[in-house]
Image: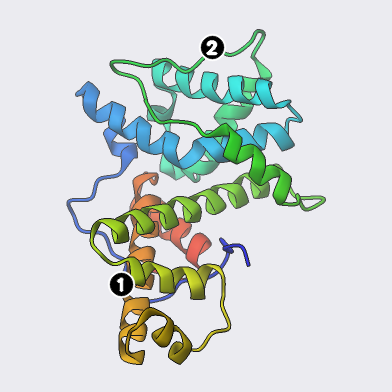
Amino acid sequence: MPFDPDTAMGGGSGKFPLTHHSAMASLRSEQEPVRTRAMEAILTAYWKPAYKYLRIQWNRGNEDAKDLTQGFFAQAVEKGWFAAYSPEKGSFRSFLRSCLDGYVSHQDEAASRLKRGGGVVTVSLDFETAEGELAELPVAGGMSTEEYFRREWIRHLFSTAVDQLRQECGRTQKQKHFLLFQSYDIEETAASYQDMARQLDLTVTAVNNHLAWARRRFRQIVLDRVREVCGSEEEYQREVRDVLGVAVK
């Protein structure tokens, strides 16, 4: 079964260490490298939801949506649009979507390709994967533009968090931790802990501990990524409740 972005992941405290900075604050830095890293974080979090939103809600073709997605973020970098965001006026997600709507509405010619080099974002945009997801996932009828963008942002958030967990487990020799997480929380296997223990040559206790660790780490990755694109503690709390269905302390 495909991974469900609406699945609630409970657990212990998700409060961020004071050393973790929001990309929103970094956008206002006087140092260009700091601003660039902040834009890369925002682009990583939002390019795919933006692309799908353009394909479905704006009814744009594949190539047109690619150009608009790249052009929108290139303009946002060049003109510093996101630095104007104020958390008192709502979520950054809604702000970005409004900026995107405005950009598309006033776009009189083909969007410029995303530039590469000093001072601009360099995140690779895998449009082929995004297009494949559109073909596989049905769009609910009557869904509002706000709800569609929210759903795709959460889906992308969870997907990138799973990828990060997979990479971390590979680097730290915790492949079995990830296999258990994949089996129980992504594929939702019906296998018992005893079955998985035999399959992976582990004790049942180790299966339980490995899975618990992977779930905690996944949850923290999600929290980190949400925090990165929130402009205030209040917005962060709202977004976490929306994404995970639980409050954090």
- Residue at mark 1: 13
Q: Secondary structure at mark 2?
A: loop
Relative side of 108 to 193, left or right: right
Residue appearing at x 48%, y 66% in the figure: 244
Reply above or below: 57 against 174: above
Q: Which percent across, then down, holds residue 75?
A: 47, 17
> Marks 1 and 2: which is nearer the front?
2
Looking at the image, which is closer to me, 192 or 92? Answer: 192
Which tag, 1 or 2, sits closer to the chain's start?
A: 1
Q: Which percent across, then down, holds residue 220?
A: 33, 63
- Residue at mark 2: 112
Q: Which percent across, then down, holds residue 179?
A: 42, 69
Residue appearing at x 26%, y 59% in the figure: 16
Q: Quadrant of the N terminus?
A: bottom right
Residue appearing at x 69%, y 27% in the figure: 62
What amino acid type is highlighted by mark number 2?
Ser
Q: Which percent across, then down, holds residue 185?
A: 50, 72
